[in-house]
Amino acid sequence: MFLLALGPFAWLLNGAIANTLGANPAEALIRGTGDWTLRFLCLTLAVTPLRQWGGWPALLRLRRMLGLFTFFYGVLHFLCYAWLDMGLDAGDILRDIPKRPFVLVGTAALLLMAPLAATSFDRAIRALGGARWRALHRAVYGTAVLALLHFFWMRAGKNDFAEVAVYAAILGGLLGWRLWKRYGARRLSA
């Protein structure tokens, strides 16, 4: 699974080196890493429902790795933006983030993921305690909303919402399932 998760990175890197990413390779890298961040976020959030629906407890072992790959591709996405769009000029980046809403919410999503990645190892779980660790890691739901909003605003400039609608349906289903499990199932059993 680790090698499969590295596949998109290898494909993008190979495309950049071989100059096969099309007429605008910078845009291809920025969009490609962003797309893969969103895909890995969906995969990470799909682990629990798939595990429960399919009775596959082994899937739980993949969730941490998928979450870390979500962060990895998110960092790559930000680095591609910082390097290829902003020339790694920290001042320009800091001025650009609050100026463009889609950059602001994308950066917020990445910053929200950072503590999740930093506390994803067993020692952090023990140090925080299970309840606090789970509460912290519920921030992934906020990350999902911010990531979708980032994608929506980015596509709004081109009035292209078809792909946004697909991700919105997937994330809506995954988050809606969690809400139903938490609140709806209790009401039915009461």
Image (cartoon, helix red, strand yellow):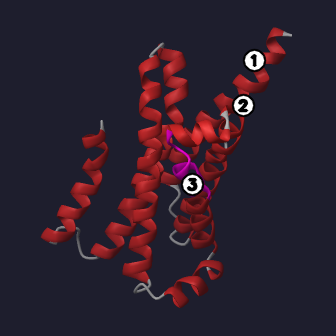
Q: Amino acid at mark 3?
A: Met
Mark closer to the chain start, 3 or 1: 3
Instruction: Return the x and y of residue 160 as percentages of the image width and height.
Output: 50, 62
User: Which label was assigned to residue 41?
Assistant: none
Query: Is there any visible trace of residue 130 in the rendered image?
Result: yes
| Residue sitting at x 28%, y 56% | 9
Label 2 sits on what residue type?
A: Leu
Q: Which residues are magenta?
A: 112-121
Q: Is residue 179 left or right of residue 63?
A: right
Distance, label 3 to label 1, CA atoms, is 29 Å
The answer to whether residue 52 is magenta is no
Tell me the element at label 1: helix
Residue at 16% x, 72% y: name it.
Answer: 19
Q: Residues within 10 Å of mark 2 (few under 14, many from 20)?
A: few
Contact, mark 3 vs mark 1 (Cβ under 8 Å): no
Q: Quadrant of the C terminus?
A: top right
Task: Please report contact status of discs 1 and 2: CB closer than 8 Å, yes or no.
Answer: no
Tell me the element at label 2: helix
- Work out how far the residue at label 1 is from the one at label 2, CA to CA, in angstroms: 9 Å
What residue did someone put label 2 on? Answer: 179
3 or 1: mark nearer the eye: 3
- Residue at left offset 70%, top offset 23%: 181
Q: Position of residue 170 (x, y in %)?
A: 54, 39
Residue, disc 1: 185
Instruction: Examine the image and state in which quarter residue 80 appears.
Output: bottom left
Q: Look at the numbered disc 3 and give the secondary structure of its residue.
A: helix
Q: Main secondary structure of the magenta part?
A: helix
Q: Which residue is mark 3?
A: 113
The residue lying toward the viewer, choosing from 173 and 3, is 3
Q: Is residue 8 left or right of residue 118?
A: left
